Amino acid sequence: MAYLVISCSLNPQSRSRVLARAAAARIEASGDGVDFVDLRKHSLPPCDGGITALDANAQVLARRIADSDGVIVACPVYNFNVSSSVKNLVELTGDAWRDKVVAIVCASGGEASYMAHLGIANSLMLDFRCVIVPRFVHAGELEVTPDSIVSAETQRRLDETISLFLRMARALSLSPERAGPSA
C-alpha cells in the first residue's frame, strides 16, 4: 500500500511540516510506501471554480492523491482555521479525494483553535465521501519547533493517529466496495 503525506504550509519555518515528516517516517517504518508532497514546491493558482483546476501542478497533485491508499494532511492553523492553502488544494483537486481515508495533523499558535480542522474534515466527508480518522493532532507552538517535536505527548498522539490511519486504510482497502465488481 502507498500513502500520501501532504505538507500544506507555505512557511519555510513550518512546524506542521515537522509533523508531516514525522508522519511519513512513521508510515515508512511500518513497511508501507509513502509519498511526500511539500506544497511549497508546487505553485498552485487560487481556485476560480473553473479553469484553474486544469493547471498542470493541480493535475499532478490530483493524480498523486487519487493514486494513494490514504492521505495525511499536515497544515498550519491561522485565525482559528486551517490555512487557505489546504482549502485551495482540495478545491483544485476535487474528485481525487473521493473515498480516501484522511488523517489531519495541525500546528497552531495555541490551544484555543483545536477544532480548526473540522471545516475541511466536513467538506471532505460530505463532498467526497472521505473517511476521516477520528483522532487528530493539534500541536501548539511549545510542542513542536521548526526543527522537531519536543513534546512526548504530541509524539504519542501522532503515533496513535498514524497507527489508526493505517489500520483504517488497510481495512477499507479490503472492503468489497473498494475491491470493485466481483467476477
Image (cartoon, rainbow, N blue to C red):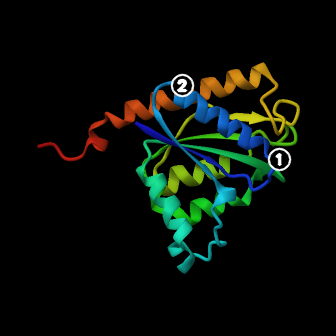
| Disc 2, SS | helix
- Is residue 99 left or right of 147 when viewed as pictured? left
Q: Is residue 83 left or right of residue 25?
A: right
Side of 180 relative to 129 (left or right):
left
Q: Residue under circle 2?
A: 29
Q: What is the x, y in percent for residue 89?
A: 61, 60
Residue 122 is situated, as x and y percent measured from the top left of the image, at 59, 50
The amino acid beneath tag 1 is Gln
Extreme residue toward the bottom, this view: 51
What label sits on residue 13 in the rendered view? 1
> Crowdedness of circle 2 by 10 Å Cα count: few (<14), some, many (20+)?
few
Q: Position of residue 159 (x, y in %)?
A: 63, 24
Quarter holding the N terminus is: top left
Count numbered badges in the picture: 2
User: Residue drawn 52% across and 71% down?
Assistant: 56
**Which of the numbered marks, if any, corresponds to residue 5?**
none
Q: Which structural element holds mark 1?
A: loop
